[in-house]
Image: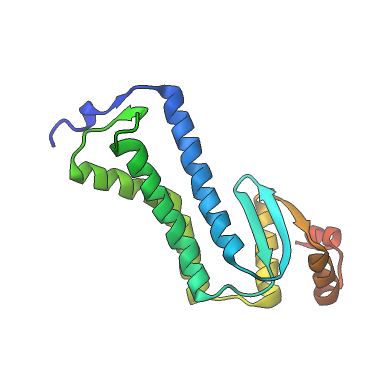
Amino acid sequence: MPGTVTNVHITNVLGIIGFLVLWLILFGCAHLLVTLLRNERLIGWAIGPLGLTILFMREPSTLYILLDAIIPAIVSGCFLYLGLFTAFPSPIFIPHHPLIEIVVIACGVFITSFADCMNALRDLRYPLWGEARVLRSIQFLRASWASIHFTRFGLSYLQDHFDSNPRDLLQAL
């Protein structure tokens, strides 16, 4: 174990960048897959620097909240293991020692899934329903410079529940 850090070698800089981008894309796709499994009325979606966000009308179930935190973490850990510690050509050489593998994968999963775990704990501890959940989501998306798009159902929902159109609601928030 001594000298482990000195035994780490970068073999391909562009490969590391591609590896990181592919890792984050697969992580985002796992989130999207779990979200698409949720079969509820869609209010709208947003595209921003933090990825794709989908707005639903109802509070998610406890199972969905847990799956949305666990499945992307599993995908992240599997991708890191397969990309760094198997026979596939890796852009970075890391010594193969079980403790090193566990630490590297745990750190990677922590980096990608910490916010998801905090959101899951918040949703389980302090759940929001109906209009409050929609308003919190829209306010968060506005703060992250996301472009919000509403469905026909979402437009009618805004008109019925807030007596507003999307432009006026977004300006108010």
**In x, y percent, where is residue 45?**
70, 57
Front residue of 119/54: it is: 54
**In x, y percent, where is residue 44?**
73, 61
Relative vertical location of residue 19 with respect to residue 123 in this rendering, above or below? above
Identify the image's colour scheme: rainbow, by chain, secondary structure or one colour: rainbow
* Residue located 46% across and 55% down the image: 72
- Decide if residue 100 is in sight here: yes
- Which picture quadrant has residue 138? bottom right
- Which picture quadrant has residue 85? top left
Front residue of 112/73: it is: 73
- Decide if residue 142 is in sight here: no
* Residue located 36% across and 37% down the image: 83
Q: Residue furthest front?
A: 87
* Residue located 64% across and 56% down the image: 53
**In x, y percent, where is residue 7?**
21, 27
Front residue of 88/55: it is: 88
Relative vertical location of residue 19 with respect to residue 69 in this rendering, above or below? above
**In x, y percent, where is residue 160?**
84, 76
Give the number of marks.
0
Image quarter hosting the C terminus: bottom right
Q: Residue furthest left?
A: 2
Image quarter hosting the N terminus: top left
* Residue located 54% across and 49% down the image: 28
Relative vertical location of residue 96 with respect to residue 136 in this rendering, above or below? above
